[in-house]
Image (cartoon, rainbow, N blue to C red):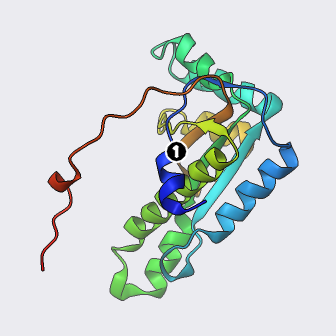
Amino acid sequence: MSIINSLKKRRTHYDIKKDLPISQDELVEIVEKVTELVPDSLNMKSARVVLALDEKQDELWDSIYEAFDGQVPREKIDSFKAGHGTILYFYDKDVVENMSDTYPFAKDKFPTWSMQANAMLQLAMWSALKEKNIGASLQHYDPVIDEPVRELFDLPDNWVLNAQMPFGAIGSEPEAKEKEDIKKRVIVKK
């Protein structure tokens, strides 16, 4: 599949289910391979991923609901919990700080470059899932959930949560996107 077609097909899916059209082993292989292949500045490899499946999927979304103390509707949380799993995206702040110390000429750039690499990883993962007919959405419940997530998965303090991607079998397709006038955002000069 071409990158353009892959990006066209990638959509936000809120209606997700537990079943998957692929095996869990194939899913793990995709997550590992995409994480390995996405580039970052000076090969810093600051991105970290946790794949929450089975009981951990349910525990994750229950702990998110509890962290918000009812401020996020249970129905919304349950829509994410209904999926097969969640990919949690982190960056390792120790790696970023070490790169800043190693390359002082770009010290202030490494946090930005780390976020850019993490965003590329999220988009690549989302597109790879869609290629396997798996729906996903990107959520941002951090920093409220940082501590509960760290405790649930026994993660080090230097892993900083960046985003959550619940995924699963596609229950229904989202409505078609309205075509935008891309000329408002892209300027070509010759």
Residue 157 seen anywhere in this rendered image of the structure: no
Helix, strand or loop status at disc 1: loop
Q: From the viewer's side, name the closer residue of 157 and 140.
A: 140
Residue type for callout 1: Arg
Q: Residue at x 50, y 35 (%)?
A: 12
Location of residue 188 in the rendering, given as x and y in whole percent from the top left corner: 16, 70
Location of residue 112 in the rendering, given as x and y in whole percent from the top left corner: 38, 66
Say left or right for 32 vs 74: right
Q: From the viewer's side, name the closer residue of 165 and 67.
A: 165
Query: Which quadrant holds the C terminus?
Result: bottom left
Residue 43 seen anywhere in this rendered image of the structure: yes
Say left or right for 113 vs 30: left
Q: From the viewer's side, name the closer residue of 24 and 55.
A: 24
Q: From the viewer's side, name the closer residue of 176 and 35.
A: 176
Query: Which quadrant holds the N terminus?
Result: bottom right
Q: Which image quarter: residue 187? A: bottom left
Category of crowding for the residue at label 1, using alpha-carbon neighbours closer than 10 angstroms: few (below 14), some (14–19), many (at least 20): many
| Disc 1 target residue | 10
Q: Residue at x 53, y 17 (%)?
A: 76
Q: Residue at x 50, y 83 (%)?
A: 42
Location of residue 85 in the rendering, given as x and y in whole percent from the top left corner: 72, 35
Q: Is residue 52 above or below residue 44?
A: above
